[in-house]
Amino acid sequence: FELNQYPGINQSVVYSEELLVGYRWYSFMGVTPAFPFGHGLGYAEMEYANLTVSQEERTVAFTVTNAGSASAGDVAQLYLAFPEDAKEPPMQLKAFEKTRALKPGASQRVSISLRDRDLSVYSAAAHKWGVKDGKFMVLVGSSSADIRLRSELVVTKEYADARNNPEEEGDGIAAFPDVFAL
C-alpha cells in the first residue's frame, strides 16, 4: 500500500484500485491466491461438461457430474469477460447456482439466464448503465481460479442500441429502469 491509500493522509484515503478489487485484481495481475474467490473443499470431484450458450435467449447451460465416491453438491459460478474496448476487469462474476446433493455418478443440468444488467457497463459521463455490444467470453467453473468451460456470447450493436434507447422501440421501457433514473 501507499501512504495515501492506507492509512491515508489528513483523513483522506485514495481508492486507486477502481474495479480491480479481490478476485478481479488477482486475475488482472495473474496471481493465484491460496484460496481463490469461490473456493471450497468438498467431498467429491465434480466434472463440468456440455456447455451451451443461447445467443438469442442469453442463456448459459451446462452439466455438473459427481465424479467422486461420496454424495456432494457444488456451487457452479458463471463469469463474463467483457470485450476489450469496455475496459472492464478481466472477468466478473455474474451468477452462481448451487446443485442439489448429487450421488456418485449423478448429473444435474444447470441453466442460468443473463440479464441486460450483466452485459452492461456504467458510463460516468452519461450517468447511466448501458448494454455493451461485442464478443463476451463466458467462463464457468467452481471458483475464480478453476474455470472449466469456455464459450462466447455475441451481443450485436443492434441489440445493445435497442436496449439502451428503449423509447426508439416505442415501448418506453428501459432494460433495467431502476438504474436509468437518477
Image: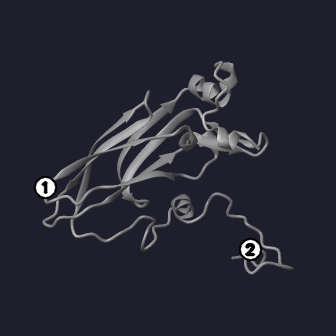
Amino acid type shown at disc 2: Gln
Q: Position of residue 119 (x, y in %)?
A: 55, 40
Residue 4 seen by the camera: yes
Position of residue 125 measured from the top left corner of the image (x, y, whole percent): 79, 42
First in sequence, mark 2 or 1: give its number.
Answer: 2
Vertical placement of residue 92 versus 86, above or below: below
Residue 87: % across, % down = 64, 46
Residue that appears at 47% across and 40% down: 114
**Does residue 83 show up?**
no
- In this picture the colour scheme is one colour
Instruction: Using residue 82 as the reference point, say whether residue 36 is left or right of it.
Output: left
- Dot 2, how many residues are within 10 Å of its Cα: few (below 14), some (14-19), or many (20+)? some
| Disc 2 target residue | 5
Circle 1 residues within 10 Å: few <14, some 14–19, many ≥20: some
In the shown orientation, is residue 24 left or right of residue 85? left
The reply to whether callout 2 and callout 1 are in contact (CB within 8 Å) is no
| Residue that badge 1 annotates | 105
| Local SS, label 1 | loop
Labels 2, 1: front one: 1
Question: Which structural element holds mark 2?
Answer: loop
Can you give x and y, in whole percent of width and height, for residue 55 in the image?
A: 43, 30
Q: Is residue 58 left or right of residue 29?
A: left
Cα distance, mark 2 to mark 1? Answer: 50 Å
Amino acid marked by disc 1: Gly
| Residue 40: mark in rendering | none
In the image, residue 74 above or below residue 157? below
Residue drawn at x 42%, y 64% is 38
